[in-house]
Image (tube, grey):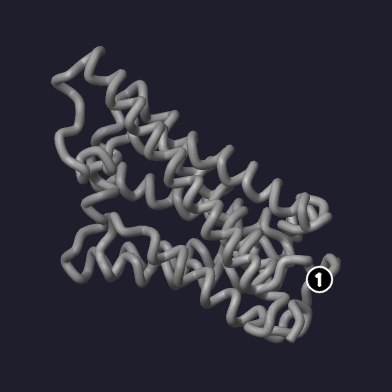
């Protein structure tokens, strides 16, 4: 099954089959993620040590408080972005492929983007409406706590991390590198969409099971759009828009 025929949608300008197959792609993904975790852990430790010297009273006193803190999240994101970009760049170089081709960093097709935008907004509206009607609130407690921790000086940096940096490194890894290798393997595009969405959703451990399921659905949408448009830039842009919408909802809920 090829990317051009799976899901019944065409893919423009599909690059040659990658050197890395299913297991090699999986191994690279695990290695990149392990390095990412080490980089983030080191960044958090350095942050907390410096924080204790400057303002000990404001240092988060629990793992939950730290993970939902705007400063900590921003530092984690800053550590993640270069780590993932450099790790993927190294893997694609060894595969003797161009970085932009391997990750499908192609111009966004206007028609495909409009379709993706409509679907993304509809999904975001639906999940927040479901949360409100089911009594869970417009947003998750994690999102509310994160927004509340972003004081005046941190609001814009947090917005940049959530809307720009996080979508870039997550999409490059999941809809870019992993999708590229898995879609060319025996599991095909459908398998790549499902598997990448499962793993992506499962890593969002800060949320409850319902929200993780909603993130899985969003991953399926992004994977389908990646296959349909042949462009990871499309999913990066839509991921950023989805995060922006969620941040706006959190601001509204906070009053």
- To which quarter of the image does residue 154 belong? top left
The residue that appears at 36% across and 72% down in the rendered structure is: 213
Residue 246 in view of the camera: yes
Nearest the viewer among 179 and 234 is 179
Badge 1, how many Cα within 10 Å: few under 14, some, many 20+?
Answer: some
Horizontally, residue 45 falls left or right of residue 91, namely left
Residue 120 x/y as whole percent:
51, 64
Residue 205 locus on image (x, y percent)? 31, 59
**Above or below for 188 versus 251:** below
Q: In the image, 209: left or right of 184?
A: left
* 106 shown above or below 149: below
The vertical placement of 62 against 210, above or below, is above
Name the residue nearer the viewer: 63 or 4. 63
The image position of residue 25, as x and y in percent, is 64, 65
Front one among 171 and 86:
86
**In percent of the image, x 38 and y 46: which residue is there?**
247
Please give the name of the residue rendered at 76% of the width and 60% of the height, measured from the top-left corner: 109
Residue at label 1? 17
Q: Position of residue 82 (x, y in %)?
A: 58, 38
Q: Residue at x 76, y 81 (%)?
A: 2
Locate the C terminus and report the quarter of the image it occupies.
top left
On-image quarter of the N terminus: bottom right
């Amino acid at each position: 099954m090829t990317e051009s025929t799976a899901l019944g949608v065409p893919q423009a300008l599909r690059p040659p089959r990658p050197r890395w197959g299913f297991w090699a792609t999986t191994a690279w993904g695990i290695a990149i993620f392990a390095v990412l975790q080490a980089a983030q852990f080191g960044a958090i430790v350095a942050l907390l040590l410096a924080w204790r010297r400057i303002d000990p009273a404001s240092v988060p006193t629990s793992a939950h408080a730290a993970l939902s803190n705007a400063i900590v999240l921003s530092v984690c994101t800053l550590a993640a972005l270069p780590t993932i970009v450099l790790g993927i760049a190294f893997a694609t170089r060894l595969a003797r492929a161009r970085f932009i081709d391997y990750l499908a960093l192609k111009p966004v097709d206007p028609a495909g983007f409009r379709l993706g935008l409509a679907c993304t907004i509809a999904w975001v509206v639906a999940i927040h409406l479901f949360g409100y009607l089911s009594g869970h609130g417009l947003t998750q407690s994690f999102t509310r706590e994160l927004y509340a921790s972003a004081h005046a000086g941190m609001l814009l940096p947090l917005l940049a991390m959530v809307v720009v940096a996080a979508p870039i490194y997550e999409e490059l890894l999941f809809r870019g590198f992993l999708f590229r290798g898995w879609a060319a393997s025996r599991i095909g595009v459908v398998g790549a969409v499902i598997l990448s969405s499962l793993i992506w959703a499962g890593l969002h451990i800060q949320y409850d099971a319902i929200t993780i399921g909603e993130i899985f659905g969003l991953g399926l949408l992004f994977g389908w759009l990646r296959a349909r448009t042949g462009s990871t830039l499309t999913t990066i842009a839509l991921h950023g828009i989805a995060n922006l919408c969620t941040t706006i909802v959190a601001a509204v809920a906070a009053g």
